[in-house]
Amino acid sequence: MSELKTRILDMVKTDLAEIETALVENLKPNVELVSTIAGHILFSGGKRLRPLLMVLCAKICHYQGGYDKTFSIIFEYLHAATLLHDDVVDGALMRRGKPAAHSLWGGAAAVLTGDFLLARSLAIAAETGNIRIIRTISEITDNMAQGEIHQLMRKGDIHLSEAEYLEVIRRKTAVLFQGACRVSALIADAPQGWETALADYGFHLGMAFQMADDLLDYTEDSLALGKTVGADLKEGKLTLPVIYALKAAGTKDRQRMEAIISNTEFSVPEFQELVEYLKAYGGIDYTWQKANAHIESAKTAIARFEPSVPREILMDVADYALKRKS
């Protein structure tokens, strides 16, 4: 996996450098505190996957303009805004191995900085002059907000269904990946078939990415993830490994699992006990299989394009999304 990551980074290093420059040049808030908080979340180790997807997909569509990097940062600003908002809602203490912004500057300042980043995203989208791009960004923000509200409404609910979980991650994660890939076709004025294929790739990649991310909470140590042990459960988030295992478990084991989940102050040994239940009842394997199926669908979608370096990278990104460690 380290070789795959190294190969991807080597092939996109110029694109990533230009994306980084665009992120800085287009921020420019008038209030210093906004700059400080935005910088704290934007420049603390993010992978830039979403803007990179837009840039790579634009290349597949033979985009000839010079604004792909600028337009791509729409999706990083949107992503950063949701992280600021989510951490306030969830009461998360860490993000990417650093204190969450709200724990340093307060919830109000963090939320308002998130609002600023949303506004910057829409402003950049408006500069395209393309109503379909503006509508796409608007629909993304709509979906992400409703996904967060849905998750909030079912916070800590041990009866959350797999169908509801899938709808939440579609809204909170997959639509942003999907939108980044779709907009690349729009700025390149690509055929409808290309737009559909890229949107399909982004959707399936996003679904798999979130499932793989949810698995990390139960398969990697907290130091590697940059967050506390059992962070999802402590925030009341039931993800697919838990949902599946709860459904599959016998009465006695299910009751024990529910007891651990219901106590947000569970100990590290109790969390490790829960992980063993997830393994025993197939929650981890099932989630991996579902994520893998989405990756295969993503690869099928991108395989519709003629062989090229960007297509090869997008294939590698799909593999990395599923198998990454942190």
Image: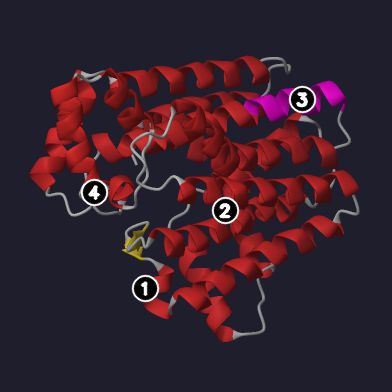
Q: For the residue labelled by badge 1, is the local secondary structure a helix, a strand or a loop?
A: helix
In the rendered image, residue 61 lying in the magenta stretch gets the answer no
- Asked whether residue 60 appears in the rendered view, the answer is yes
Gap between marks 4 and 1, in whole Å?
19 Å
The type of residue carrying mark 3 is: Thr
Going by the picture, which residue comes out furthest to the left? 269
Q: Position of residue 270 (x, y in %)?
A: 11, 42
Mark drawn on residue 149: none
Asked which quadrant contains residue 202, the reply is: top right
**Residue found 86% across the figure and 25% down from its top:** 192
Q: For the residue labelled by badge 2, is the local secondary structure a helix, a strand or a loop?
A: helix
Name the magenta segment's main secondary structure: helix
Gap between marks 3 and 4, in whole Å?
38 Å
The type of residue carrying mark 4 is: Ser
Q: Earlier in the sequence, mark 4 or mark 2?
A: 2
Give the quadrant of the N terminus: top left
Figure coloring: secondary structure
* Closer to the camera in the image, 308 or 298: 298
**Residue found 20% across the figure and 27% down from its top:** 254
Q: For the residue labelled by badge 3, is the local secondary structure a helix, a strand or a loop?
A: helix
| Residue highlighted by disc 1 | 103
Q: Is residue 27 above or below residue 145?
A: below
**Residue found 8% across the figure and 43% down from its top:** 269
| Residue highlighted by disc 2 | 79
> Are the residues flagged by discs 4 and 2 in contact, CB closer than 8 Å?
no
Say which of marks 1 and 2 sits in front: 1
> Are the residues flagged by discs 3 and 1 in contact, CB closer than 8 Å?
no
**Part of the protein shown in magenta:** 191-201
